[in-house]
Image (tube, helix red, strand yellow):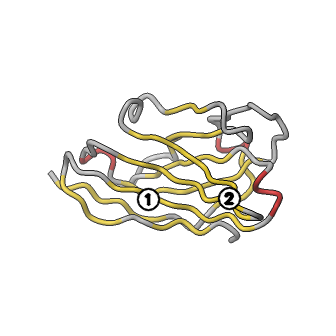
Amino acid sequence: VQLQASGGGLVQAGGSLRLSCAAPGRRFIQSPMGWFRQAPGKEREFVGVISRSDRNRKYGDSVKGRFTVSRDNALNTVNLNLQMNDLKPEDTAVYYCAASERQSWDGVYRDPNDYSTWGQGTLVTVSS
């Protein structure tokens, strides 16, 4: 595991959380980076992605307008963030950060199969 996700926890509905993911290594600076989540008994779901260029972002329909993906390419480490506002109980899941090996400068990808490196996940629980 080369990606380290953090920031999960318990929050009430309507609250906010900020997840972070550290991706050490120059190759991640050249990678589109994404967030996915998986709730118990459900398939992994696309949450959001940011392009290698930092110019493009794409979000899943269920989080659009509430979640924001950002990245900070500092020296040889990418710090990927997911700001989550107006959280709902249905946002409860384990959240994973991931890095794609696609080389497109502005590309953004929704398919988990486009991602080759994954973090260990961080649990977000939203109470009603």
Relative placement, left or right, of 120 versus 1 is: left
Residue at image position (65%, 44%) is 112
Relative placement, left or right, of 16 versus 13 is: right
Relative placement, left or right, of 36 versus 99 is: left
Q: Quadrant of the N terminus?
A: bottom right
Q: Determine which residue is flagged by label 2.
A: 78
If you read the primary sequence from the N terminus, does the residue marked by circle 1 or circle 2 appear first?
Answer: 2
Q: Secondary structure at mark 1?
A: strand
Q: Secondary structure at mark 2?
A: strand
Residue type (three-letter) at the residue carrying disc 2: Val
Residue at image position (77%, 64%) is 76
Nearer-the-camera pick, 43 or 56: 56
Residue type (three-letter) at the residue carrying disc 1: Val
Query: Within 10 Å of the Cα at label 1, are there few (<14), some (14-19), or many (20+) other Cα atoms?
Result: some
Question: Which numbered marker is on residue 94?
Answer: 1
Residue 62 on image: x %, y % = 39, 32
User: Do the CB atoms of the residues marked 1 and 2 lie less than 8 Å apart?
Assistant: no
Above or below 84: residue 4? below
